Image: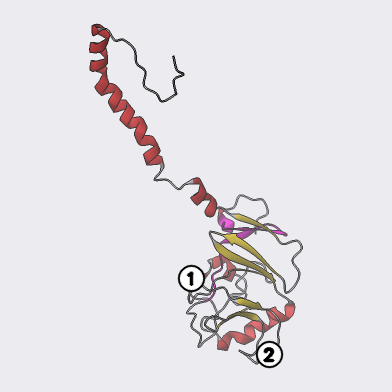
Amino acid sequence: MANQGVNDPIHEPVNAGRRRFLTATTAVVGAVGAGIAAVPFIKSWNPSARAKLAGAPVTADISALQEGQRLIYEWRGQPIWIVKRSKAILDALPTLDSHLRDPLSENPEQQPAYVLQGDPELRSIKPEISVLVGLCTHLGCSPEIKAEIRPEPFDPEWKGGYFCPCHKSRFDMAGRVFEGVPAPTNLVVPPHHYADDNTIVIGVDPSQSNTPGAA
């Protein structure tokens, strides 16, 4: 007799009494079977493992990050920029307010409220560390970092920031958008917190963190 597969039907003689029993129980088994079959279908309505992973927090090690440098991570399919700003850059930020569309970040959709609690012009939990979603708020291009304070072809009084070559939008080193450019709003600050002095967890607000010592 050939080996029988796991899902192959079983063929065996059935006497009359057994046949009546099987006939009577078919409806019950069918109903139970339908319930079991529905489980995978219902579970498929929940987020898949891949979808959950796509939205999972990302841990960033900033221990080796130097002034003027940028780390790039990916969270929810978006580039996340972590930049260490120099004192000169921090000092320059307040001088740009009159050139910006939303200098005090009054659009609540662009950042969590806690990054504005210290100095709203910095848009950061720690003054020197900026965390931004690296996508232009015009059409989603990825701007270039121009971190040095020096004249640039697009701005002879450039104080450092981000320039989008696609449509010429400009942002300062806090991600605040300049007036008169296509981008309508500041760069987005994602939810994040500090697990310790050298570790940023992207995707989780401080209030949601159970990490001891989280900022």
Q: Residue at x 61, y 49 (%)?
A: 210
Secondary element under disc 1, as helix, strand or loop, is helix
Choose the circle earlier in sequence order: 2 or 1.
Answer: 1
Other residues around mark 1 within 10 Å, as few (<14) / some (14–19) / many (≥20): few
**Left or right relative to 1: residue 95:** right
Quadrant housing the C terminus: bottom right
**Left or right relative to 73: residue 5:** left
Q: What range is drawn magenta here?
A: 186-207
Quadrant housing the N terminus: top left
Give the percent coordinates (x, y) of residue 124.
62, 69
Secondary element under disc 2, as helix, strand or loop, is loop
Note whether 92 is above or below 130 in the view shown.
below
Q: Which mark is residue 80?
A: none
Q: Residue at x 74, y 66 (%)?
A: 65
Which one is in front, 157 or 135? Answer: 135
Note whether 195 is above or below 67 in the view shown.
above
On the image, numbered disc 1 is attached to which residue? 108
Note whether 156 is above or below 6 in the view shown.
below
Which one is in front, 127 or 203? Answer: 203
Nearest to the eye among marks 2 and 1: give it.
Answer: 2
Q: Residue at x 72, y 59 (%)?
A: 198
Q: Residue at x 23, y 16 (%)?
A: 23
According to the image, what is the colour scheme of the structure?
secondary structure
